[in-house]
Amino acid sequence: MGALSDALVQQLGQNKKQLSTPCYIYSVKTAHDNYKQLKEALGTGLIYSLKANSCLDLILRCGHIFEDGIEIASIGELNLLPKGNSPRFVNNPSADKAFIRAAIASKCHLIIDNLNQLTLVEELKARRPVNPVVLRLNPSILSHFDRNQKGLRKDHFGFDWNGCLEALDFCKKHEIPVLGFHLFRGSYSFNKGAFDTAKVALQVVYEFEEILGYPLSLANLGGGFDPNWREQEFDFEQYRNLIAEFPDHIKVVHESGRAIMGSAGYFVTEVRYIKSINGDKYAVCDGGMAQNFLLAKTESTFKRFQQPHVLRNGTPLKGNDEGQKVLLVGTSCNKEDVIGEVSNIDLREGDLVIFDGCGAYNASYTVAPFLKLPAPNSYLVE
């Protein structure tokens, strides 16, 4: 748990009556810094994955830095995002005809997951021009080029190698231009697989160009970054040297949502009541798993609840791991609605509890419709 920024403490302390909890507060500066620093470390382009955080106010404030593009995963995201100069990539394995038609009309680049989607593109391109498509490659491609690949997790996305050959043949036959390819090993996979992925991607470039008979423009090597990527051991200089081996006409990009937005967001909820049951203490808050499902750790085998910051009348309070724990619970009727714990702080009604690291997926990956509970508000801070 890091320290609260002075700007956030000031915002919460001075504007508590104007802030409606539960809410998310996003730091524009942190999002900017995360994007620029990760892009510089990689030495490549960096596409923002909108599904990580689709807060429109935040996107509008950050949109100008997402110069390499934004990845869109639903027609709802497509309709939300205002038109701009940055490229837009639509990536959804179940995208239907209506979604694909809307993406083409919006001049997006389609990331193609299967031959059926290519068939729809071929049908629709007779009515309006289609931007060059990107073929999504299944991670099994890695083992096709390198038999020593280990630890590849199976998934259902994209083409295997035989599927790639069929897709490329279809594109040639029906004159569907191919921009490049997208190769992603999965969440939190970058450190372990970045070098192997880049080496195989370089081979894929040569194979695709030979089959198509013209040069590609894009190689998307995916993401899989940890929000704490700066603190982990990874040789970015050596990685940049490897990326430099790609032909000059290829724009190498990565994509990220978690590493850009994760540390830029806070979830804030207010303590409504304090109670004890058989010696165990609970703080009932006005926000819980309905507004921040990930904090409840329901998808974890072993639950380790996050320790939030506590703010009382504008003053941060310090706790530690000693003393009796107070469990923070939400407003639903679900017994799993436990979102955190506080130790060695005598919580009171009206205290604000602030969870950091909640900028990516916490707001978008949740269950707010449950019980018709209110959706969290969103606010920005510099």
Image (cartoon, grey):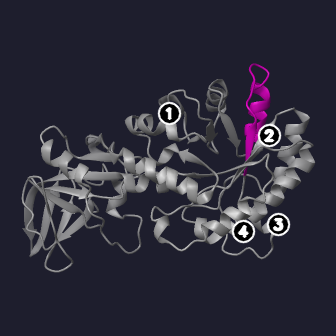
Q: Position of residue 45 (x, y in %)?
A: 63, 49
**Image-quadrant location for residue 101:** top right
How far apart are the alpha carbons under marks 1 and 3?
Answer: 37 Å
Q: Position of residue 197 (x, y in %)?
A: 71, 64
Residue position marked by numbered label 1 in the rendering: 76
Q: Amino acid at mark 3?
A: Phe
- Is 245 on the left-hand or right-hand side of 349? right
Crowding at label 2, few (<14), some or many (≥20) Cα neighbours within 10 Å?
A: many
Q: Secondary structure at mark 4?
A: helix
The first of marks 1 and 3 along the sequence is 1
Label 4: how many Cα within 10 Å (few below 14, some 14–19, many 20+): few
What secondary structure is marked by label 2?
strand
Residue occupying the point 54% across, 38% down: 74
From what the image shows, is residue 25 above or below residue 197? above
Please give the name of the residue rendered at 73% of the width and 43% of the height, measured from the top-left corner: 134
Point out residue 7 in the picture as x, y percentages from the top left corner. Answer: 24, 49
Q: Earlier in the sequence, mark 3 or mark 4?
A: 3
Left-right relation of 335 to 180 = left
Within 10 Å of disc 3 (Cα), the crowding (few <14, some 14-19, many 20+) is some
Q: Which residues are magenta?
A: 116-136
C-alpha separation, residue under disc 2 versus residue under disc 3? 21 Å
Q: Label 3 belongs to which residue?
A: 145
